[in-house]
Image: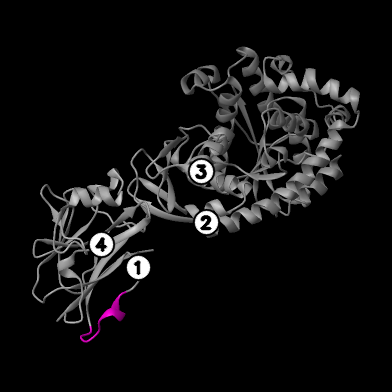
């Protein structure tokens, strides 16, 4: 078995020389054997070894004795050791978690703390092939997709999903730099037990491993024996399946990452990051790709797993939801539907898609006649004079741009609507309308109306651009329409700043 583990570690394609490996040891047979094997292979790989054990305080003096047993064993083998302890029952109640989830989060968070303190890039875990079988069955019964059917990986990054919500900033910032390694993943439990007997490893027994109120224990003691009667090599077969799915998942991820690069545009705001996605391009992707893209984006923003039902609800909302509709997701994350795109962001406020100009309600910005570089959000507004003598060829089919007849010396400002504002649309023979009626007729969403930037020239509304049911549209007031006899022509433009 020692040679098998050496080969498994070499296949990880990691240079362990001079690195520090944290060995997670509970005092049970599997983790003690892991520590012994890592100690025996230490001269070959040239790494440093540090033992960590964690007292969950679930079995009173017995669990404390387990931790002290690990300490004495590690010290006898000349391996430094660190012990952690926490009342996991109380933690589960405080964080509204199951006992299993609270224990796992507390344990992994402490492992990460020690890894950070010791400068360790690797945490070794004693999971073996039978554990892999149990894990895949658990995922299968919960309705997992490919990611779950892969089971555990020989090498995988520590992630925020392993950690407590109140983990320190230092741990959260370094989490991507710590890898979990599982040298025993292809080794059956029986072979580990034989090795332990051969080398005189006598473990501590944890009676909670027999308690079938825990999901994993029910799988181990009640489900697996039945499946192994039907097919004695069931665990080995499931291990092969996991290996195949892992490779298939790599193909899927390659496709998904290309889709993410095409579809997702990130922006920074005071409230954190916002992901902007083109709605039509997203819906043109295969449904499976849509789901994976959403999971990828949500994984950047939210804490923990996103349930399948919420991913499906999000896809349905993106496909058929009306502008302004929102969906609340875990971690205070919101999905907001727009006309041509949708956003995924923190908090309950509706961010403006980055290609839609907007102001704060009541905001006023005085402009120069040329070269103005006013910024709002991700948008920049500027103006410049058009060369004399041009007429209809100066018009462009871009709602973020307009060409206006404006006299030199005019006063320009950007502001939002005010009570009594009127607008003179083209084609109404000089008749004006309330700006509120114009907004309603265009079907501009209520949430945008108080933020639409109005370009005002000499106290008269000359132009605006806003989202409508037919997409982003601009409107020029009749008095500012360019004619062949216009003496001076001003171009105004909103642009998206990267």
Which of the two labelled residues, at mark 4 and mark 3, occupies the earlier sequence position? 3
* Residue 48, horizontal then vertical, whole percent: 67, 45
Nearer the observer, 486 or 62? 486
Q: Which residues are magenta?
A: 387-395
> Disc 4 designates what residue?
475
Q: Secondary structure at mark 1?
A: loop
Nearer to the camera, 1 or 464:
464
Cα distance in 3D space between marks 2 and 4: 27 Å
| Residue behind mark 1 | 398
Callout 2 crowding tier (Cα within 10 Å): few <14, some 14–19, many ≥20: few
Q: Residues within 10 Å of mark 3 (few under 14, many from 20)?
A: many
Q: Nearer the viewer, mark 1 or mark 3?
A: 1
Q: Position of residue 137 (x, y in %)?
A: 74, 29
Q: Are marks 1 and 4 in contact (CB under 8 Å)?
A: no
Badge 3 is on which residue? 298
- Which quadrant holds residue 471? bottom left
Label of residue 281 in the image: 2
Question: Element at badge 3?
Answer: helix
Lower sequence index among marks 3 and 2: 2
| Residue 131 x %, y % | 76, 31
Question: Is residue 395 rendered to the left or right of residue 299?
Answer: left
Quadrant for the N terminus, please: top right
């Amino acid at each position: 078995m020692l040679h098998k583990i050496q080969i498994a570690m070499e296949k990880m394609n990691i240079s362990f020389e001079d690195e520090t490996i944290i060995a997670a040891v509970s005092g049970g047979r599997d983790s003690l054997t892991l520590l012994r094997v890592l100690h025996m292979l230490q001269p070959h790989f040239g790494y440093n070894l540090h033992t960590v054990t964690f007292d969950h305080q679930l079995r009173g003096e017995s669990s404390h004795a387990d931790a002290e047993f690990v300490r004495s064993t590690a010290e006898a083998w000349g391996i430094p050791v660190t012990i952690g302890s926490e009342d996991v029952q109380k933690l589960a109640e405080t964080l509204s978690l199951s006992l299993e989830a609270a224990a796992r989060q507390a344990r992994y968070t402490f492992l990460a703390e020690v890894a950070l303190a010791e400068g360790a890039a690797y945490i070794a875990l004693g999971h073996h092939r039978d554990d892999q079988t149990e894990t895949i069955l658990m995922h299968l019964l919960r309705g997992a997709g490919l990611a779950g059917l892969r089971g555990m990986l020989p090498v995988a990054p520590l992630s925020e999903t392993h950690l407590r919500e109140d983990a320190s900033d230092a741990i959260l910032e370094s989490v991507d730099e710590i890898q979990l390694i599982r040298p025993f993943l292809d080794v059956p439990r029986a072979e580990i037990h034989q090795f332990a007997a051969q080398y005189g490893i006598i473990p501590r027994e944890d009676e909670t491993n027999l308690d079938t109120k825990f999901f994993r224990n029910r799988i181990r003691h009640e489900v697996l024996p039945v499946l192994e009667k039907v097919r004695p090599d069931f665990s080995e077969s499931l291990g092969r399946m996991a290996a195949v799915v892992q490779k298939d998942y790599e193909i899927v991820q390659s496709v998904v990452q290309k889709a993410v690069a095409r579809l997702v545009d990130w922006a920074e705001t005071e409230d954190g990051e916002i992901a902007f996605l083109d709605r039509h391009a997203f819906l043109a992707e295969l449904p499976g790709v849509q789901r994976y893209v959403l999971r990828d984006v949500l994984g950047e923003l939210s804490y923990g797993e996103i349930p399948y039902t919420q991913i499906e609800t999000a896809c349905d909302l993106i496909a058929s939801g009306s502008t302004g509709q929102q969906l609340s997701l875990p971690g205070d994350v919101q999905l907001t539907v727009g006309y041509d795109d949708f956003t995924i962001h923190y908090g309950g406020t509706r961010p403006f898609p980055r290609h839609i100009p907007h102001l704060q309600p009541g905001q006023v910005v005085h402009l120069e006649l040329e070269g103005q570089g006013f910024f709002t959000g991700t948008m920049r507004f500027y103006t410049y004079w058009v060369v004399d003598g041009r007429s209809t060829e100066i018009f462009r089919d871009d709602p973020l741009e307009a060409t206006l007849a404006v006299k030199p010396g005019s006063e320009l400002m950007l502001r939002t609507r005010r009570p009594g504002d009127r607008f003179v649309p083209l084609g109404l023979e000089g008749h004006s309308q309330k700006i509120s009626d114009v907004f309603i007729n265009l079907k501009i969403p209520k949430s945008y109306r108080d933020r639409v930037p109005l370009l005002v020239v000499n106290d008269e509304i000359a132009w605006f651009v806003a989202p409508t049911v037919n997409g982003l549209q601009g409107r020029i007031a009749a008095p500012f329409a360019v004619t062949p006899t216009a003496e001076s022509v001003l171009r105004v433009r909103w642009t998206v700043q990267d």
